[in-house]
Image (tube, grey):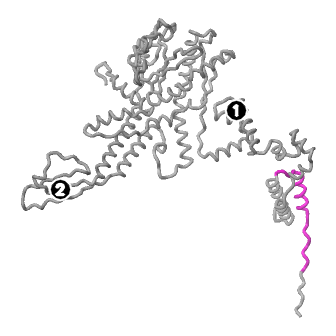
Amino acid sequence: MLVGNLTIFDSLKFATRSRQLDLLARGDYSPIQSELDATFPNSSLPVRAIPFVQRYVAELAGLYARPVVRRFRPGDLGLAAFTKLQTVYGESKIDRAMDRIEQALWVQNTVMAVVMPDGLGKVRLQPILPWQVEAVEVTDAMAASNPRSWSRVVAQMPASVTADQVIMGRLELTHTHAWRATAAGKVGIYAEDGTHPFGRVPIIIAHRVAPDDGRWAAPINEAVLNLQMSLSLQSADNENIVRNCAWPQKVIKNATIAQQVDEVTVGPDKVLALVRSGNPDDPAPELAVVQGQVPVSELVSFAEHQIRLYCAMLGLDPSAFLRVNTAVTAAARLFSAQDRAAIRHRLQPVLRQFENDLARWIVAVLALREPMPLPTDLGVDVTWSIPAPQSDPQSDAQATTAGIAIGTEAPSLVVANRDGISRKAALALVESNLAEARALGLIAPASVQLATADPDTATDPAAAAARAADPAADVAKEALNGAQVASMLAVITAVSDKSMAANSGKALLRIAFPTASDAAIDSMIAAASTHTPPAAEPTVEQPDG
């Protein structure tokens, strides 16, 4: 709200809504109860957990749920430094922390993080959500969203746990000091005296949505929070409506004054007394049972309409949130997956910038205690394992097989792109899988496959040695059975009597008998095409008698 040249911002409301989104995204539905009490103050409605926020995050997040490949810059980074960084990232569980940061960005739109020492060769990446921030002192209002323009940050952090109750303390960061509260008191984060040598507030920030001018944080995702609250409150209210409408309510029509009660609670075990006017000519009292009609279809349609409207505004397919009676076609699934991929792609530049800032802060924090120096201008290129959208898994598998057969695809490259690993590691994985499949008898050994593909040019030493040791076994393996001989003879006969073209016969034999050599097929078809069938002898009818 703008009053003159003053912009009024309700920081308490902002922190409350941010906290609600954080709890709902992690499956804690306690914020629903406070909304129920405020919306229905005269009713005691139960909390109904509808995981819309969780589902929304699950539909869009997940870049760090699969293996992530990081390539550190500069390119001449030594093997020892590269190995050290890989170990630090693994031991510090950076991917797990980044997964939480990515999920939070979809609903909070702004996330901070602090890199803290966590023992030798490890760091702790501690996310800070907007609701945790108590104060951000900005020195340049034009660059309020840039941490370099901040002079002080105060945020809430868990300080101690007593009887399963978490007691929050304060984390304070300035240009020269960094403190946090613990059960033992105030302790320094980077040094015992609380100082640090960084020369600026040691914090990282990511914005999915650009903040307003003069604000350090972007607005939270109000649309997702509003729909979550609406669905949960409507579900509780609908249950109350159905319960009351379904009760067969007992009613005394034309009751007398003696039958009147001061206060009546509606319910199946209560009786409502409807007092008559007192005229003796009025009808006598009678007991009746009244039952309302439950508008189930209208209530369900209203909820579905809300979900479809919000999903359309958020760019999501509502079928992921609704169970529909009609089947979803493969093309519809493909387009839906492409839409989600396009939305996810918008977050990747934000995460790449965050990863570069994170790498530099990790190096700076490690330099406080580690003996091995690392480059201060360290950068990182991140590659996420993003599976391609599939409309039909069977069609995709057939297309991949055809691409490998004609040389446009390579098995190792397909696996590398799918799992986000190097091509060398993918090749080792493919070879291991093929060896296991051969050992289990699921596919033919390599020697048999090679001989089947082209027995005249097979170069497998083991297969050649086996054929030399037992020629009879090799001949028996390649011999045709009776049905195969009959099929081949039928094709040759068709070519011979001109009912099938010679080229068609060759092609059919090559497809049906891949182990037969081209020379043998050409010889048989050539002989059949030049063969002239014997002329049929005239039939002489014998006279009767």
Residue 340, x across and y down, in percent: 52, 37
Lower sequence index among marks 2 and 1: 2
- Quadrant occupied by the N terminus: top left
Point out the residue furthest to the bottom here: 545
Which residue is identified by label 2? 252
Q: Find out whether residue 527 is within the magenta segment.
A: yes
Q: Position of residue 316 (x, y in %)?
A: 48, 39
Which residue lies most toward the top here?
193
Q: Is residue 261 magenta?
A: no
Q: Quadrant of residue 73?
A: top right
Would residue 412 be found to the left or right of residue 375 on screen? right
Judged by depth in the image, the label closer to the viewer, 2 or 1, is: 2
Neighbourhood count class around disc 2 (C-alpha, 10 Å): few under 14, some 14–19, many 20 upward? some
Left or right, 525 with respect to 129, comes to right
Magenta region: 514-538
Q: Is residue 171 left or right of residue 8?
A: right
Residue indicated by mark 1: 426
The CA distance from mark 2 to mark 1 is 80 Å
Residue toward you, 530 or 424:
424
Give me the residue at 90% from left, 68% from top.
533
Q: Quadrant of the C terminus?
A: bottom right
377 and 143: which is toward the camera: 377
